[in-house]
Image (spheres, grey):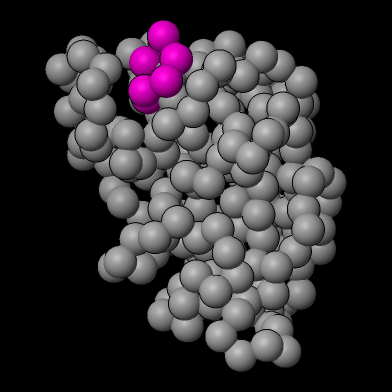
Amino acid sequence: MKIAIISDIHGHWPGLEIVVQHIQSKDVDRIICLGDLVEGGEDNDFVVEFIKNKNILTVRGNHDENNDCQLQPDNQNWLSNLPETIIENGIMFTHISPRLNKRAIQDNIEAWNVLEEVKFRLVFIGHLHFPAMFGNRYDLFGEACPYNVDYGEIILDPTDRYIISFGAIGYARGGGKFIRYGIYDSVKNSVEFIKLEGELLPYGQ
């Protein structure tokens, strides 16, 4: 099965539209969204209604739970009732972290903490707004293996475990200039980091 994984839309419908059109060319079986649908762009209700009406499996992000968007009540209620995690076949999908103490997984030390605490084969996360990948197998104690990722396909080692962030649709961090999402292919045991041209939101949160 090929799963397109999107995250951190932040009310940015033009970016989401670009990604959805690109996904249609990739022959995926379904889409999973890793949260933060709202707060940032001007199309918050529209983004929520699109994801909701397309029955896209979605986890709750921190901006979905707490925001100042003045959403339609039924849209905010839908966001508030989203699950914090989705678990399928040894794979976890979540927004920030699977740990009880939810810190952003943006370095190899925190990635090691996560991989020590949970034993999922793959953990897909949002929240970072930039592509990142950490492996469990590493020579240094107390640190996960950091990978330098930008775009393209990576074949995963079936005997290793990974934490993966594909980046954001709404806006990038760290000087990024691209709209990003990714694809997980369970048959090939691969991930594909995808970056697309398009206007990002002018500010971050």
Up-down relation of residue 98 to residue 51 (above or below): below
Q: Is 157 covered by the magenta stretch?
A: no
Q: Does 189 appear above or below 9?
A: below
Which residue does the image show at 51% across and 21% down from the upper left? 203
Query: Picture quarter containing residue 109?
Result: bottom right
Residue 24 in which image quadrant: top right
Above or below, comparing residue 100 to residue 32 in the picture: below
Is residue 41 highlighted in magenta? Answer: yes
Foreground residue among 66 and 28:
66
The main secondary structure of the magenta stretch is: loop
* First to last magenta residue range: 38-44
Residue 17, horizontal then vertical, whole percent:
60, 15
Position of 95 relative to 10 (above/below): below
Q: Where is residue 39 in the image (x, y as percent from the top left)?
A: 36, 23
Q: What's the residue at 30%, 33% (across, down)? A: 64
Q: Which residue is drawn at 25% across and 27% down?
A: 67
